[in-house]
Image: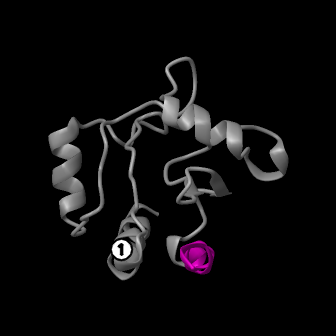
Amino acid sequence: MTDSNYKQLQALQEKLEPQGFTVLAFPCNQFGGQEPGDAAKIRSFVDGYGVTFPMFAKIDVNGPNTHPVYKFLKKEKREFMGLTSDIKWNFAKFLVRRDGSVANRYLPTTSPSSIEKDILALLK
C-alpha cells in the first residue's frame, strides 16, 4: 500500500500542481509503528519515490495528542457512514477545497488515482 500511494500521490502532484492542487503529507507512527524514524529518515525514505509535495513533521492523528489539523478534518468528515471520526490506518485521505472546507474523506485503501475526478471537479 505504501509504494502505490506514494507513486500515485506524486503523479497527482505533478499532473495537477499547475492547476493549483497540492498534496500535503503528515507522517504518523500510530499504526503498527510503521513510521518510527525522525524527520530526516522519513524524508530520505520518500525521496526514493521522487516526492516533491510538502512532508510535514510527524503527528498524532488520533487520541489525546491529535494535531489540530486532524481534529478539524475529522470533525468535518467522519469515517464511512459517520460511525467514527478516528483515522483507521496510514494513507487516509482528505480532499480540501480552496476555501479550506473539507470536500471528502477517503479510506486508506482508496487509491489516490481513483480520486482524481473529484479533485478535477474542485479545480474547475
Please state which amino acid type lies under the numbered disc 1. Glu
Q: Is residue 3 above or below residue 85?
A: below
Task: Name the chief secondary structure element in magenta.
Answer: helix
Question: Within 10 angstroms of label 1, few (less than 14), some, or many (20 or more) residues?
Answer: few
Tell me which residue sits at (56%, 79%) in the image: 120
Residue 18, percent across and down?
Answer: 34, 78
On screen, 95 above or below 77?
Answer: below
Rendered image quadrant of residue 12: bottom left
Q: Which residue is drawn at 43% across and 69% down?
A: 21
Q: Quadrant of residue 71?
A: top right
Instruction: Determine whether 84 is above or below 118 in the image.
Output: above
Question: Seen in the image, is 115 located left or right of residue 67?
Answer: right
Q: Can you say whether 63 is above or below 29 in the image?
A: above
Residue 24 horizontal/vertical position (percent):
39, 54
Tell me the quarter of the image containing the C terminus: bottom right
Q: What stretch is highlighted in magenta?
A: 114-124
